[in-house]
Image (cartoon, rainbow, N blue to C red):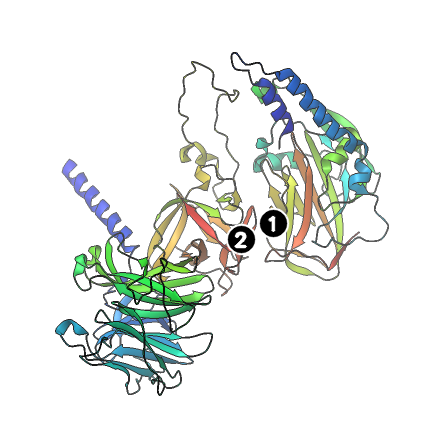
């Protein structure tokens, strides 16, 4: 769901002749309601959606979802629509190095990185404007890794970004987790749901790409069969979003799609 | 020159028509009347017909030739495998067309149906049912059922002359159970058959006019009962004793007069029905073997259709996404504007995206596949084409599945996944078996998966991810729809 579009589109509807529709009032009320909905959750995002991980290794939840992640504060990457997230676009964007050791870093809680960002001053009627004409500015900023345990099966990135940087839309999130397998696990699949598009790597190998304007859906996409080695395995993901909610869920599944709920812990 | 071109065009069109027709009917010499239920023996399929003999298919059930051996002549046999033996029933007489209604139904056993096997030898036939001229029954056209709930063996028989009857046989001997009395379960049918499914017994019979070529009105109907002994009731509440019967299959396409039903359960969710068509317009109006998917709707059997070649969306039953090439989605340029039509603004149609608009931007080598929102785009439109001379399966040939307007073909991979190759080359992993399932959806299976002997099907392991896996009828992951 694309909230900003809805607001703007409602505001653009002209009343029919001889009928008075208070469009401005509707717009302000809508904004007020959205604001009311957003504000409390923004204030309490950490408590509501996340808890600080303990030192003990975590287990996947009863449905196999991995809830413990390192999450980097969102990189600013404005996109006015999520329909631009083609495979080629994602490969190009995620191949760019935003911060050092982007594809190998095993972060620590609170670790800071210097990261590139992009910013665009969106005009008021941005849907009518050719994206090529928008002025993009770039720079670097300091972002911090956070170690989080999600209270829900899906990690609500937007709430995290909103809490840390008041940054809702036009973002890239990098996430990492390390799982410890009791035994080698063959023919398993990485299962992803993400909002919006995302790309995932297991032990440095590309496992899955979910392109397009994605909703977060459990088991939206699965990797080809892969092998998790005994011991540590690193799962790395990048999630990109323009307008709208950002979140993701990850679990492993057997060859036949059945969720794997045991046999590994999350460090 | 122009005339020459016209002639070539005509020949090509004729060839295409023949190819198309071949994909919609059994090929070889599938000429038969009253085919027995299809039976598999050592990798070959067999059926027997009226007058003796029968057909054999050595390619999985697509190409049929004469060669099956059944002595005794007479009308409308049936065959049933019980244990490691085949029980063949037939009527030693030809029915009442000649004026007499004295009939006999007989049974006999054989260890194999392969006439070239050293084990091929029929036992001495035994009479299990008879009729005399004065009876309200004509003892011909037997159909066999081994009741899976009780292990008891039943045989139906009869024709237009009077009642359809069932009797009980001994499944060990094939003889009539001593003291068993025949039960009347219907009237005025030919070539009846009994089947059991999901707590229901079904009596299938053929109504209409037999043996009049393209003017035969034969059609197959059924009634059902909770008891093998009936009453068999149709969907309007009429019993088959009252002449009732719900239609299962009638004339369609270029075939008319379906008769003599037989049910073949391939596996859970995959069923076929066999029959003959009194006449196939494409094959000289001769009576030919017909094999169709057997569907079930509200516990009523319905004949499905032979898969029709054409260009389709291939929709996953799991979520409704469409199978597509994993390439960049290319937007169709459209003037940026709000939803509301401005008064006076001209409304112009927008051209659909064509293959030429996008194909040069696609990678040249292998392109993976995924499932996505169907947008009627070239990377989502698949042409299904029958492939000749590579065998087939029950009632259908293998197909190639290519992106419409190209030779880019869907292919199974050695790691149990699925991809597309830039050029179809006839490899077995590029040939696909398309079975309509009992619920009307489809199963799509590669003929072979490189590196394994396992039979795997195209399935959606996730909403957006197709792969190959073991078929499970109870999972929507394994089901697809073909949409125009």
For the question of whether residue B423 can be seen, the reply is no
Residue at mark 1 shares a chain with residue at mark 2: no
Q: Residue at x 48, y 25 (%)?
A: B333
Q: Is B435 on the left or on the right of B76, as rendered?
A: right
Task: List x then y, in percent, for residue A193.
Answer: 64, 44
Q: Quadrant of residue B312?
A: top left
Q: Disc 1 versus disc 2: distance between alpha carbons?
A: 9 Å
Quarter of the image with the N terminus of chain B in it: top left
Q: Provide the chain ID for the residue under circle 2.
A: B
Up-down: is B452 above or below A93?
Answer: below
Up-down: is B377 above or below A36?
Answer: below
Q: Which residue is mark 1?
A: A222
Q: Residue furthest top?
A: A18
Task: List x then y, in percent, for residue B434.
Answer: 41, 56
Q: Residue at x 82, y 39 (%)?
A: A47
Q: Cβ–Cβ below 8 Å for labels 1 and 2?
A: yes
Is A150 in front, or is A17?
A: A17
Q: SS for tag 1?
A: strand
Q: Residues within 10 Å of mark 1 (few under 14, many from 20)?
A: many
Mark linked to residue B467: 2
Is B80 in front, or is A23?
A: A23
């Amino acid at each position: 769901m694309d909230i900003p579009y809805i607001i703007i589109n409602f505001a653009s509807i002209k009343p029919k002749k001889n009928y008075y529709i208070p469009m401005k009032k509707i717009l302000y009320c809508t904004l007020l309601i959205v604001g009311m909905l957003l504000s409390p959750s923004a204030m309490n995002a950490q408590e509501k959606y996340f808890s600080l991980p303990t030192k003990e290794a975590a287990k996947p939840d009863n449905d196999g979802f991995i809830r413990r992640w390192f999450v980097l504060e969102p990189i600013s990457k404005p996109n006015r629509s999520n329909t631009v997230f083609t495979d080629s676009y994602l490969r190009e964007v995620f191949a760019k190095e935003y911060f050092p050791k982007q594809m190998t870093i095993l972060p620590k809680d609170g670790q800071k990185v210097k990261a590139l960002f992009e910013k665009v001053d969106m005009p008021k009627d941005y849907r009518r404007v050719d994206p090529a004409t928008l002025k993009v500015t770039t720079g670097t900023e300091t972002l911090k890794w956070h170690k989080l345990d999600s209270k829900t099966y899906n990690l609500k990135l937007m709430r995290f970004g909103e809490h840390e940087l008041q940054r809702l839309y036009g973002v890239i999130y990098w996430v990492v987790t390390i799982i410890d397998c009791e035994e080698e696990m063959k023919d398993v699949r990485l299962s992803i749901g993400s909002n919006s598009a995302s790309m995932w790597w297991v032990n440095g190998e590309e496992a899955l790409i979910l392109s397009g304007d994605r909703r977060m859906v459990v088991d939206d996409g699965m990797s080809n069969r892969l092998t998790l080695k005994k011991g540590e395995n690193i799962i790395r993901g990048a999630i990109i979003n323009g307008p709208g909610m950002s979140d993701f869920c990850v679990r492993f599944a057997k060859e036949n799609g059945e969720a794997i709920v045991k046999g590994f812990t999350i460090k | 020159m122009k005339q020459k071109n016209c002639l070539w065009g005509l020949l090509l069109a004729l060839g295409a028509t023949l190819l198309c027709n071949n994909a919609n009917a059994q090929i070889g010499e599938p000429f038969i009347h009253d085919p027995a239920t299809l039976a598999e023996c050592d990798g070959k399929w067999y059926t027997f017909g009226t007058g003796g003999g029968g057909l054999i298919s050595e390619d999985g059930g697509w190409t049929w030739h004469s060669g099956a051996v059944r002595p005794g002549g007479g009308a409308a046999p049936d065959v049933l495998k019980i244990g490691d033996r085949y029980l063949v029933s037939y009527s030693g007489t030809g029915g009442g067309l000649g004026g007499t209604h004295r009939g006999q139904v007989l049974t006999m056993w054989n260890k194999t149906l392969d006439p070239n096997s050293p084990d091929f030898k029929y036992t001495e036939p035994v009479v299990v049912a008879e009729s005399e001229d004065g009876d309200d029954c004509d003892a011909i056209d037997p159909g066999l059922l081994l009741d899976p709930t009780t292990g008891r063996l039943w045989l139906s028989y009869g024709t237009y002359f009077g009642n359809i009857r069932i009797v009980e046989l001994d499944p060990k001997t094939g003889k009539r159970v001593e003291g068993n009395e025949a039960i009347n379960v219907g009237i005025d049918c030919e070539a009846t058959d009994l089947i059991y499914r999901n707590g229901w017994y079904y009596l299938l019979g053929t109504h209409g006019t037999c043996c009049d070529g393209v003017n035969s009105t034969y059609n197959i109907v059924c009634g059902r009962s909770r008891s093998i002994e009936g009453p068999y009731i149709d969907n309007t509440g009429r019993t088959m004793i009252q002449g009732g019967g719900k239609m299962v299959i009638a004339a369609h396409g270029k075939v008319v007069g379906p008769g003599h039903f037989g049910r073949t359960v391939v596996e859970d969710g995959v069923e076929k029905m066999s029959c003959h068509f009194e006449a196939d317009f494409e094959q000289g109006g001769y009576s030919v073997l017909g094999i169709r998917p057997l569907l079930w709707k509200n516990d009523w059997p319905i004949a499905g259709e032979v898969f029709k070649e054409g260009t389709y969306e291939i929709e996953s039953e799991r979520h409704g996404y469409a199978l597509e090439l994993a390439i960049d989605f290319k937007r169709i340029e459209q003037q940026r504007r709000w939803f509301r039509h401005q008064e006076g603004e001209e409304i112009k149609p927008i051209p659909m995206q064509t293959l030429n608009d996008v194909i040069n931007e696609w990678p040249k080598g292998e392109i993976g596949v995924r499932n996505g929102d169907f947008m009627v785009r070239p990377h989502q439109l698949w042409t299904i084409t029958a492939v000749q001379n590579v065998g087939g399966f029950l009632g259908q040939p293998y197909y190639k599945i290519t992106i419409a307007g190209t030779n880019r073909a869907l292919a199974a991979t050695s790691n149990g996944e699925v991809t597309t190759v830039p050029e179809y080359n006839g490899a077995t992993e590029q040939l696909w078996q398309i079975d309509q399932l009992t619920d009307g959806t489809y199963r799509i299976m590669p003929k072979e998966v490189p590196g394994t002997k396992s039979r795997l099907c195209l399935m959606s392991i996730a909403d957006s991810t197709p792969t190959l896996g073991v078929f499970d009828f109870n999972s929507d992951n394994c089901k697809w729809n073909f949409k125009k």
